[in-house]
Image (cartoon, rainbow, N blue to C red):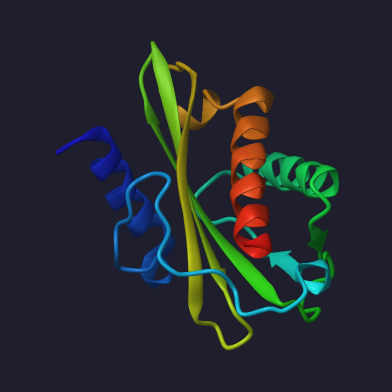
Amino acid sequence: MTVLSTAMLALAACAGNQVPPAYVSPGSTTASAPAVTDPQKVTVAFEPFTGAPGNIADELSRAIGTEARKQDLKLVRRVGAPATFRVNGYLSASGDQSSTTMFYVLDVVDSGGNRVHRIVGQETAPGSSGDPWAGPNSDTLSRAARRAVTELAAWIRS
């Protein structure tokens, strides 16, 4: 079993029934463009990330906020506030002393809770002994945020 497959299984175990059943390879998506006539009116709410320690999830959330502002993506930050789309994020990390890989799956759901798009990716980080979450650093999280927001914005604008 590959490292990616193992990590995705671990990710599924961490998130319980919340992780959608289908595995999608990195860079793949599962649906077509959103049925929204004006991309400038689209709002997005990121739900709390599942699978990562709080400090990693918080830093990734801040990095996503920074990238969203740079790419003119409108985020809704109030808990429970209405949004065109909500993003459920699942994170996992695997590695050893030489390198760590952080995996992420971001499921975009519509107001009815139906998954309409999936973003899957991974970022390599420095290695760590013991806890793989010690590997991902600010640079790793910034790269993940940049790639995820870029793909999300492109999908919304397509």
Task: Report whether 76 appears left or right of 56.
Answer: right
Above or below, comparing residue 55 to residue 45 in the picture: above
| Residue 32, horizontal then vertical, whole percent | 48, 69
Above or below, comparing residue 1 to residue 116 in the picture: above
Foreground residue, 59 or 107?
A: 107
Going 83% across and 42% down the picture, which residue do you hit?
70
| Residue 119, horizontal then vertical, whole percent | 49, 54
Residue 128 visible at all: yes
| Residue 19, horizontal then vertical, whole percent | 40, 65
Foreground residue, 74 or 131?
A: 74
Task: Report whether 13 appears left or right of 39.
Answer: left
Going 43% across and 70% down the picture, which residue do you hit?
18
Going 61% across and 80% down the picture, which residue do you hit?
35
Above or below, comparing residue 3 to residue 54 in the picture: above
Examine the image and state in which quarter residue 112 appears.
bottom right
Quadrant showing the N terminus? top left
Q: Residue furthest bottom?
A: 112
Quadrant showing the C terminus? bottom right
Task: Report whether 83 appears left or right of 136.
Answer: right
| Residue 86, horizontal then vertical, whole percent | 65, 71
Task: Report whether 113 appears left or right of 68.
Answer: left
Total residue callouts: 0
Residue 131 visible at all: no
